[in-house]
Image (cartoon, rainbow, N blue to C red):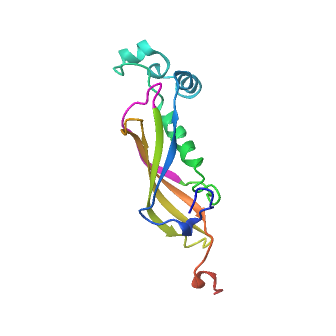
Amino acid sequence: MTAETPRYFDDFEVGQRFKSRGATLSEAQILDFAWQYDPQPFHLDKEAAAHWGYDGLIASGFQTLLVGFRLFFQENIWTAASLGSPGMDEVRWLLPVRPGDTIHTEAEVMEARASRSKPDRGILKMRYEIYNQRGEMVMSFIANKIFRRNRLEPEETAEN
């Protein structure tokens, strides 16, 4: 199945893995995001970041999450059938992302279950890991994603 092929709930299997392309975060991008959404000193000022023990400017963890999500989304792995997410679990920021770092996202299907109340959809539990250019995991999280189904089992379509 190629990235261009639409994937629905039924097309995913537990254990299946995906990997995104990378993106490099510039100092300007880190500063711009920090000014708008996370104005903590270690995201805005190199000297302040050194004072806080970070040895230089670091990206907001929220920026890392959002860039990692965008990278995965752009792979078109689930864009055709995604109905959103009821939430995330176990969000972990493991290492700082710095100006010039290139990150990419890897994801694995942990669980798949058809909805009992809405047979036209299912829920995937996916573990996302974001890595830098050195192969170090900088962030991880688990997301529950709701997907449209493209096929139903006969007992799911039978009228009761």
Exactly how many numbered labels are in the figure? 0
Q: Identify the residue shown where x is 52% and y is 22%.
A: 27
In the rendered image, residue 94 lying in the magenta stretch gets the answer yes
**Image location (x, y in percent) of residue 24:** 51, 32
Q: Residue furthest left?
A: 53
| Residue 2 location (% of width, % of height) | 58, 59
User: Which corner quadrant of the image does residue 91 belong to?
Assistant: top left
Is residue 25 on the magenta stretch? no
Left or right? Give the position of 149 relative to 27: right
Compared with 137, 117 (above or below) is: below
Q: Residue furthest front?
A: 2
In the rendered structure, which segment of residues is drawn in magenta? Answer: 87-101
Q: Residue 145, percent across and down?
A: 54, 57
In-front residue for pair 44/72: 72
Q: From what the image shows, is residue 41 above or below residue 115?
A: above
Q: Image height check: is 74 above or below 23?
A: below
The image quadrant that residue 98 belongs to is top left
Q: From the image, which quarter does the N terminus lie in?
A: bottom right
